[in-house]
Image (tube, rainbow, N blue to C red):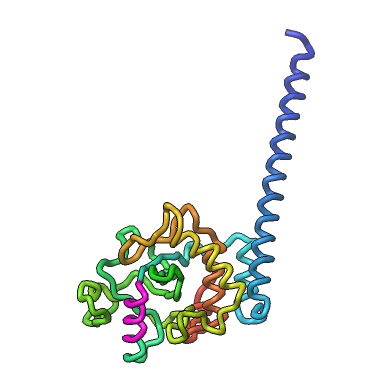
Amino acid sequence: MSENTPRMVGSMTENTDNEIDEFEKQCIIKILKQKMKLKSEHQRMFRKHMHKCHMSNISQCCVRVNNIINIYDIYTTRFTTDTYFQNQRFKESSQWTGSLYSTMLTFPQNTPDKMLFILDMNNTTNKVVGIGLVLNHLSKDQSINIYENPSYNNCVYKSKYYIQLIDINQRGGYHEFVESSWIDFIEKEFEKILFYGKGNLKRGSSFMRFPRKILKEKHIIFILSLFVVLNPNNFVENIMNQIKF
């Protein structure tokens, strides 16, 4: 073996280490750029509301390590225009403004112990018409009859917190408080996935989890921001002020 061999090996090892260090550096830079882009997009969508309590912290979740995805999750449930109208009519008659779901089946057994945002899918119009927030706990009152079809009046979940996006009394248009940038996000990030393509969720029943392969922090951050900005039934005071993420 040549006496130069150890030097050559050492040089090759050093070069390899430098290449790895450079590769890791480039990966970190790429990730940071992606995170900064998400933060910029979030601030653009909610620029009118960034002064509100918790919005700055939520925006920072786009770029820093957090446990927001361990606190919240996203599920879906399906309606037709008729069954959604029955649901909303029952809520109005009982003066309930929060989430109210009555399904054939309970949440799947593998549902995590988190706060669950529920995307209300209208399969008639292919629109997300509202967003609820519930826990995986059956309501104490299981005697509620919401729907004309009794098989739907089986498993009741409810909470005080709900956002209705579509105004069913105004020919199915969005409520005035729903901003255009929010609509764009909902259409591109939720409706495109839920209603279209081979993997759509239109044929599911009761509650189904938003696809794991697609779910990102930005989806939870967006919905959480809506609840903070719109603050249904004092969501901020009752929920956000009690949680650290």
Q: Is residue 101 left or right of residue 176?
A: left
Q: Is residue 201 left or right of residue 103?
A: right
Residue placed most toward the observer, 112 or 225: 225
Q: Residue at x 45, y 54 (%)?
A: 197
Q: Residue at x 36, y 91 (%)?
A: 95
Q: Is residue 205 visible?
A: yes
Q: Which residues are magenta?
A: 80-90
Q: Quadrant of the N terminus?
A: top right
Spot occupied by residue 139 in the image (x, y as percentages of width and height)? 29, 78
Q: Is residue 80 left or right of residue 152?
A: right
Quadrant of residue 126 within the rendered picture:
bottom left
Q: Give the number of callouts.
A: 0
Question: Does the stretch in magenta take in 89?
Answer: yes
Residue placed most toward the observer, 139 or 92: 92
Q: Quadrant of the C terminus?
A: bottom right
Q: Main secondary structure of the magenta part?
A: helix
Spot occupied by residue 215 in the image (x, y as percentages of width and height)? 50, 58
Residue placed most toward the observer, 118 or 199: 199
Q: Is residue 67 visible?
A: no
Spot occupied by residue 225 in the image (x, y as percentages of width and height)? 56, 74
What residue occupies the far front of the structure in this picture?
Answer: 171
Q: Residue at x 69, y 60 (%)?
A: 36
Question: Does the stretch in magenta take in 206?
Answer: no
Spot occupied by residue 99 in the image (x, y as percentages of width and height)? 39, 79
Quadrant of residue 123 within the rendered picture:
bottom left
